[in-house]
Image (tube, rainbow, N blue to C red):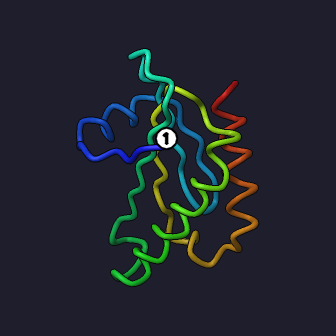
Amino acid sequence: MTRLTRRADYLAANRGARAPMPGFVLLVRRREDGDPGMRIGITVSKKVGNAVTRNRMKRRFRALAKEILPEHGHHGADHVLIGRPGGIERAFSSLSAELIKALRKVRR
């Protein structure tokens, strides 16, 4: 699983499927380039909190992605997690269940 680094990839993912959850918004876009690998992008804006809060949230999202995407993610797709203000207070188990639910929702 590689990370998204270019702004164009984030903008392209924004045109894909969207699954809003209480702690985050998941964007998924199929790449159609023949590569079966998954890519992950994480973004947390200043609306969520200060730098310490945003970095903590990004670490939690990276741990979530590492744990859940290999089994439930979409192969050949870009996944973007956008942090929401209430996401940092949510339990990791709640975020995990929400990510699985969001991935199922996007799959339909």
Q: Amino acid at mark 1?
A: His
* CA neighbours of label 1 inside 10 A, class few (<14), some (14 to 19), many (20+): many
- The answer to whether 73 is drawn above or below residue 61 in the figure is above
Most foreground residue, 67 or 87: 67
Q: Please name the residue shown 67% across and 28% down the image.
A: 107
- SS category of the residue bearing label 1: strand
Q: Position of residue 30 (x, y in %)?
A: 48, 24
Image location (x, y in percent) of residue 95: 68, 62
Q: Position of residue 59 (x, y in %)?
A: 49, 70
| Residue 80 against residue 29 in the figure, above or below | below
- Residue placed under numbered mark 1 in the picture: 79
Q: Is residue 52 above or below residue 95?
A: below
Q: What residue is rendered at 39% in x and 84% in y? A: 52
User: For the view shown, which residue lies furthest in the left direction?
Assistant: 7
Tell me: 47 left or right of 71.
left
Residue 49, image quadrant:
bottom left
Q: Is residue 106 found left or right of 78 in the rendered image?
A: right
Query: Which residue is located at x 71 percent, y 58 percent?
Result: 96
Q: Residue 75 versus residue 8: which sits nearer the camera?
A: 75
